[in-house]
Image (cartoon, coloured by chain):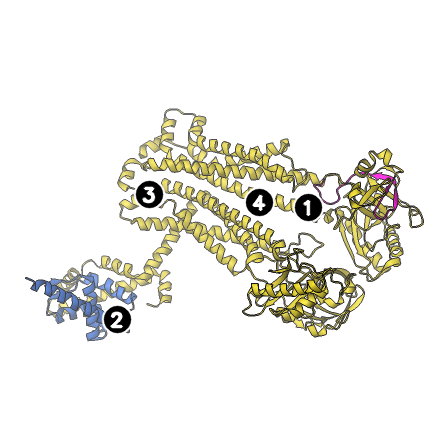
Amino acid sequence: MARNDFQGSLDLLVLKTLAQRGKLHGYGIVLHIQRASEELLQVEEGSLYPALHRMEQSKWISSEWALTETNRKAKYYKLTAAGRKQLQEAEESFEQLVRGVRAMLKYA
Amino acid sequence: MPLLRRIANLFSRSRVDREIKAEIEAHIDLRIEDNIAAGMSPEEARRAALLRFGNPTAARELVASADLALSLESIWFDLRYAARQLRRSLGFTITAVVTLALAIGANTVVFSILNAFLLRPLNVPQAQSLYGIWRTSTNDMAQSYPDYLDLRDRNRRFESLVAYNIALAGLDTGQDPSRSWIEETSGNYFDALGLQPYLGRVFHGSDERGPDSAPYIVLTHAFWHSHFQDDRGVIGRVVRLNKHPFTIIGVAPPEFHGTLSFFNPDLFVPIVNHPIFADDDFNSRSNRWVFMTMGHLKAGVSQAQAVADLNSIGASLARTYPKDDSDMTFTLARPSLYGDYVGRPVRMFMTGLMLLAGMILLAACANLGGLFAARAADRSREIALRLALGSSRRRILRGLFAEAVLIGLAGGAVGLLGSVVLLHGLSTWQPVSRWPLHMSVDPDASVYAVSLLLALASGLLFGAVPVTQVLRTNPYEIVKAGATGTKPGRFGLRLIVRDVLLVVQIAICSVLVTSSIVAMRGLARSLHNNFGFDLQNTLLVETDLDMAGYKGDGVPPEQKRMIDAVKTIPRVKFVAMADQVPLGDTQPDSNVFTDTTSDLRPANAAADALMFKVSPEYFHAAGTALLSGRAFTDQDNKDNSYVAVVNREFARRIFGSIPRAMGSYFKIPGGKRVQVVGVAEDGKYASLTEDPKPAMFLPLQQWPSNSGYLVVRSVGDPNQLGFAIRSRLRQLDSAMPAYIQTRYKSLDAFLLGPRMATLSLGVLGAMGAMLSITGIFGMAAYSVSKRLRELGIRVALGAQRKELLQAALGRAVKLLTIGSVTGLILGILASRVLAFVVSQATPRDPLVLAGVVLVMSILGLLATWIPAQRALSVDPVKLLREE
């Protein structure tokens, strides 16, 4: 199981999650990343919230308080237009990184 | 998070904290629910959730620090912490704030004056294209009226040329005839300047139809306010100027007070009425009585093009009128300060003053920097401890800067407040009551901006001084070794530079203190001078029979009636008439010749003597003592031979001695022989600092004059006589304007220079003193705190108070002494220069020496008091235990 506390990729994961699922609270994001990565990625929960607040400061996501299915109050986040753009950029640069690393590994 | 909410968060950290906490708790609770759903027991589920999440408190802090709102709040915390620190050392804070307030206040005042006179354009539309026409051959802006008309009609580069002249007129509104300063302006004046009336209408070029054709008055807003109480019904009223009816047709806009920035006229009349106010010939090209011509350049016209155009007109005029208009070449000049005539000295003076003020601010910053360095050194242990506990250097520096900026802002605010009060005083101040001289220097937005900028900049400047000190702090070394752990090498060098700076400051301060004491003593003494007349119990009543419409032969009987009327007032002892008085507005003079001279060319004159034409009782009324002979009588009139009373200097120069002068004759231009019947004491005539000058008094009855001063000597306080005199004169002629002032007051114009010099020296001296105090204080405080341990050891070894003080403050006192003595010597040398401005200014005066020594000692005492107390209260046991 790969630990992922590399900030750029945490942002990417969060943004992608919100893009796929719309409105979600922090706990939901953790669960989604875990499930969608087939249990390969596990977000360190203590560092998720600073990242969420930082992204909110950057206006990539917005937040509001709402009730969960179990009638519990939680803070829900969703993507903004700026966040969508940021996601696209982050995806592209991640693709590049992956291509680069792969090319390196193939080099004999 | 919107900005407003972010700012609101500043004041509600607890609310934001609560929200973060709730969010994290919700997360953990959700996990617990899932865990329970997965089959765990509640306690197990909770434990697992917490384990999975990590430390919630740490997470909370991390989230909080991610919030920009909270980092804004931490600046707020820094400021609050800084304010608390400053409150704890109140002496330091007050010293720093007062120093900075003085320095910033000085800069604000100087900048505001500079701004009002040099930077701010005139209050007319498109002031940047408004130029006056400067005549290079005569080096002024005066023109004859026909020349103005030619320039106006023939030039192609100005939109339209206006002309104006300044005159004094008797204004009779039906109740209180008074003298008014008027501007006679060409008809196109308001239109050409682009001014709309505030009330009523203005006159136009089309109103001018030859001499005396447009008897209209446009009031300035200020005059309308002060003399007509903002009465809107004033339009259409007929008032009299020099006894001629004029109709008030309008009020000028409030911000407009003429095109000279320091001279505020009362009202405007069309220039075609000029013959009512003076005997100038409208058609003469040699009589250049028009004060100034000016106009807006047409759009796109360069100055050079305008000058070329004017010069070609000038050349053509010179060909047509070779006698009067030879050498007509022009340049352009700004009208507001009469070109360079007033502009250059004002510019030079203000630039010099601004530089000086800037230097004062820099010196203040240097001193405050020293104080801050001392403070940082004092707190090096605290700083080291905070560093050791994990605080970042940035955070500590931010705290120090917060203190500096707070002091900067407080000093700026106090300084600005003080200068606004001062500037407002200056704006309403009329330095010479007779003339409408005003300095409209009320601060505007740019002044506020500049002083805020100065406050912030100086805060950051002196806040930056201790930066390297903090950056180089090694917490380990300091906590181990105590406060003395800074490296001595580079510091030693910097101390020497600081010492030199301090000595220079003290020397300058001492120069200023010396000169201001010299000036003050001189000023005080010059008021008890022998002026050759008596200042006590004397009134001057200025009248102008021109203004009341008297001419020629009508004048002497009217003057006689005036004297007789005033004489009947109780408590009036003597009344006399004089065409001019010593130390008055103008000092008429005339060449005099010895009786044996037959060729009365100016080159053969025996002397150039001042000449006053006076009525018989003048010498009693003025309080001028006769040393020999007699005063004039009513018999000294046109039917009898010419006589004169001369002063002692006249007698000595022309005749050799007083006895030889008595009864002798001298000649005046024109060849008349005048016999000396009396000799009066010498006096001051044209300036307070002049050497004895020859002067003669002639009987007014033999030499009639329209302008005249009534010299009234009273028993007791003359101030209450004004009303009676005014009403007597009014009974005589209801339109007779009279300007009454005490003889003391009449000297204001002469005392303006010395007073301003004394005042500015005093102000600068006070600032210099303040700077010296902070400078010495900073250095003494620093040296005491650096050597606290050494002092403790000295006390432990049995040092006495005296030795202790010597060790702690010896250096500061030495610097103070060197600086003071240097300054005193320089100040005494500089006082020779001062003697030109302030009469009787002599440094050879024990009081001056004693004063300087006293002031400098008090300064030294004030500055070293707190450090000395600190040095004396050293407790060796406590100190050594702490180490």
Q: Colour of chain A?
A: blue
Q: Is residue B663 visible?
A: yes
Circle on res. B382: 3
Query: Residue at label 1?
Result: B751
Colour chosen for chain B:
yellow
Q: Residue under mark 4: which chain is it in?
A: B
Labels 3 and 1 positioned on one and the same chain? yes
Residue B491 image point, x, y percent: 36, 37
Residue B112 to residue B476: above or below: below
| SS for callout 3 | helix
Please say whether residue B672 is one of the residues in the magenta stretch: yes
Query: Mark 4 or mark 3: which comes first in sequence?
Result: 3
Q: Are marks 1 and 4 in contact (CB under 8 Å)?
A: no
Which quadrant holds residue B429?
bottom right
Judging from the image, mark 3 belongs to the subunit labelled B
- Residue type highlighted by circle 4: Val
- Residue B174, relative to residue B464: is it above or below? below
Q: Nearer the viewer, residue B485 or B738?
A: B738
* Left-right relation of B809 to B490: right
Please, what is the three-letter code of the amino acid marked with disc 1?
A: Leu
How far across and down, in percent of the image, does residue B351 sit? Answer: 54, 50
Residue annotated with mark 4:
B763
Marks 2 and 1 on same chain: no
What is the secondary structure assignment of the residue under circle 2?
A: helix
Distance of mark 4 from mark 2, alpha carbons? 62 Å
| Chain part drawn in magenta | B666-690
| Mark before the other along the chain sequence, 3 or 1 | 3
In the image, are marks 4 and 2 on the same chain?
no
Residue B812's mark?
none
Q: In the visual, does B109 lie left or right of A14?
A: right
Which label sits in the foreground, 2 or 1?
1
CB-based contact (under 8 Å), mark 4 and mark 2: no
